[in-house]
Amino acid sequence: MIDGQMKRNGQWLELDWLALGAASSDTINPESEKDPAASPELAQPRAGSHPHVVRQWLLARSFFPQKWINRLFSIGGIQWSGEHLQLLAFPPVDPRSDASYRHLRRDTKLNMPDVLYEDDFCIVFDKPAGMAVHGSSPGQSGTLDEAAAWHLLSQGDPLNIRHIHRLDDDTSGPVLYAKNDLAQWKLDEAMRAKAIDRQYMAVVQGRMSKLSGTINMPIGKDRHHPARRRVSENGDLAISHYEVVAANSRSSLIRVKLETGRTHQIRVHLSHIGHPLLGDGLYGGSTAQLKHQALHGEKLVFPHPLTDSLIEAASPWPQWLMQLSEEMEFRSK
């Protein structure tokens, strides 16, 4: 995407049409070839051109997802303001009816997490351990989704906010949200393409024999325990990379990077190789020193949904991890 040629103006994403045309790439969206109306030979339309002509040019230049441009066209979301083209990218939702907002009240008491990154398209919250990303039952309160909706409502900007990935309730760290449909489509695509990098810190039981390694073991449901997952030949592909940062005779502090994102992936993989997370009672970890799994999302790197530039959101070590590290007197490797 071409940076600097677009900006938000209320509900609209405003494009500097002349500058955009001068800087546009000749790259053609393969999807546009399926649409006879999206011909790559099209000259850039002039200001005031019919939205259908603009749609053709935008599809041919692959600036935005085809489905998004076609949907905008169908709802009248393409219009002109002088030499600027406007796309309806930030339509507000009705807080009285939208599922994310309708249960919020002015007297709602929320544990608001820190914001690690925010712009018009996306936001990254620093989720604390003990907070669910979304409700598992009707009417559940205190979730990160609820906090995200409240954050936008308090700014007078109730957009269609949705989480892009999740963390277990007792895992702390960055969680990425999209603020509109365009961002959600682009970030979901980035997740599928493994273009979003997630890095974790974990404390595991026992001294690991290898300083680094890759765990490539499929994960499926445990039919004997509905809350658990297990390594299974019939499970889904799951790949985790780890390196030992520090250790003592009883435990290891490790950094983990995910190549896939299965439910409980880190917890299942490490437990399977004999090194369950400290505090993870569900997968065999001791809860004597910590009542939740010792897992923290340290860093999240993702391509911005408009510019494709890489954004890094780093989460400081929470108090429980710093205290645990001091108590266990880890020695760096």
Image (tube, rainbow, N blue to C red):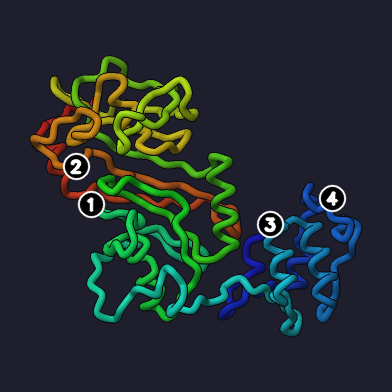
Q: Are marks 3 and 2 in contact (CB under 8 Å)?
A: no
User: Rounded to the nearest whole Å, what is the CA distance between mark 2 and mark 4?
Assistant: 52 Å
Image depth: mark 3 or mark 2 in front: 2
User: Rounded to the nearest whole Å, what is the CA distance between mark 3 and mark 2?
Assistant: 41 Å
Check disc 3 and report its element: helix, strand or loop: loop
Amino acid type at image mark 1: Gly
User: Rounded to the nearest whole Å, what is the CA distance between mark 1 and mark 3?
Assistant: 36 Å
User: Rounded to the nearest whole Å, what is the CA distance between mark 4 and mark 3?
Assistant: 14 Å
Q: Is residue 85 visible?
A: no
Q: Are marks 2 and 1 in contact (CB under 8 Å)?
A: yes
Q: Residue 288 location, x and y as percent? A: 8, 35
First-in-chain label (2 vs 4): 4
User: Rounded to the nearest whole Å, what is the CA distance between mark 2 and mark 1?
Assistant: 8 Å
The residue that disc 3 covers is: 65
Quadrant of residue 289 within the rendered picture: top left
Amino acid type at image mark 2: His
The residue that disc 2 covers is: 292
The residue that disc 4 covers is: 33
In the image, is residue 228 above or below residue 214?
below
Q: Are marks 4 and 3 in contact (CB under 8 Å)?
A: no
Amino acid type at image mark 3: Pro
Q: Residue 300 location, x and y as percent? A: 41, 47
The residue that disc 1 covers is: 130
Q: Residue at x 29, y 81 (%)?
A: 106
Residue farthest toward the top in the current orientation of the protein: 209
Instruction: Specify few, some or many for label 1: CA neighbours under 10 Å numbering under 14, 14-19, or 20 or more.
Output: some
| 271 on left or right of 42 | left
Quadrant of residue 140 within the rendered picture: bottom left
